[in-house]
Amino acid sequence: MTGGRSGGVVARSLSKHYGEGNTYVQALSEAGFEIQPGEVVALLGPSGSGKSTLLTILGLINPPSSGWLSIGGQEVIRDGQIVGNANIIRRRELGFVFQRSNLIPFLTAAENVRLVLELDDVPGREARQRARDIMEALGVADRADHLPAQLSGGQQQRVAIARSLIHQPSLLLADEPTASLDKELGRQVMQLFRSAAKDRGAAVLVVTHDQRALDLVDRIFEIEDGVLTVGSEGVAAHSTPGGR
Ligand SMILES: Nc1ncnc2c1ncn2[C@@H]1O[C@H](COP(=O)(O)OP(=O)(O)OP(=O)(O)O)[C@@H](O)[C@H]1O
Ligand SMILES: [Mg+2]
């Protein structure tokens, strides 16, 4: 394992523009911040403000126009360019959860969960055990052999979260993961992210319009017209013993 777990995320002057001339959009302006390992941050902002843009940059899906980024103590973007093998960093250091679970429809729940390990050549026996363990922890072990279409929305989302955590990512990125869930499930999902952070040392960044679970995050980042404000601590930061 390169880089170690101590790094969290450090971003410096990340900017992104799209288009030219009259289609030019400055989607992100000089964003700079750190997220510590074990910290859960909510990203709030109106539609079109740059939330997904920031997530796709941090996820090494969409390079920025300029800026610098490190994940898990490893430099991954320098002068707006992805450094090293983005596929490998993405597979080992990053976890993603989307608004819809995006499970592969023809694989069972357990196969979806362990796919990332198999792509990384983890032996089948170990991959199966780790999939069982994490699905157990998320309360979906009894649905291991079901296809995604045979699961409820909340179960699908929990399987997707198991998939995003199985390889113990340094950074977990979630884009409106609770949008399709009711209040109780939405809070449960946020709790699961909290456990991922606190138990496994992941840095977590969650885009949400959901005001109902903000007491479960440590800090809130707000973005408007591409300008990120790194901010205020949530309630959880005050109520967690030893929290920052
Ligand atoms: N591929 C693209 N090409 C051109 N412009 C884009 C592209 N993707 C996003 N934009 C523009 O960049 C700005 C930020 O978009 P982004 O998708 O990051 O917003 P968002 O905060 O995620 O919005 P939402 O809450 O609606 O998902 C918007 O003005 C959008 O129109
Ligand atoms: Mg978006």
Image (cartoon, rainbow, N blue to C red):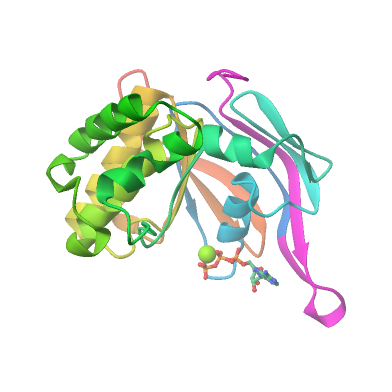
In the image, residue 216 lies at what x, y percent?
31, 41
**Image quadrant in which you'd find residue 53:** bottom right
In the image, residue 74 lies at what x, y percent?
67, 26
Q: Is residue 102 above or below residue 125?
A: below
Q: Is residue 229 above or below residue 178?
A: above
**Image quadrant in which you'd find residue 52:** bottom right
Residue interval drawn in magenta: 1-27
Q: Image point 16% across, 48% down: which residue?
A: 143
Q: Image point 61% across, 35% down: which residue?
A: 89
Q: Nearer the viewer, residue 155 or 7?
A: 155
Q: Image point 61% across, 45% down: which residue?
A: 58
Q: Is residue 40 visible?
A: no
Q: Nearer the viewer, residue 176 or 149?
A: 149
In the image, residue 225 lies at what x, y percent?
65, 65
Q: Quadrant of the C terminus?
A: top left
Q: Residue extending furthest bottom? A: 22
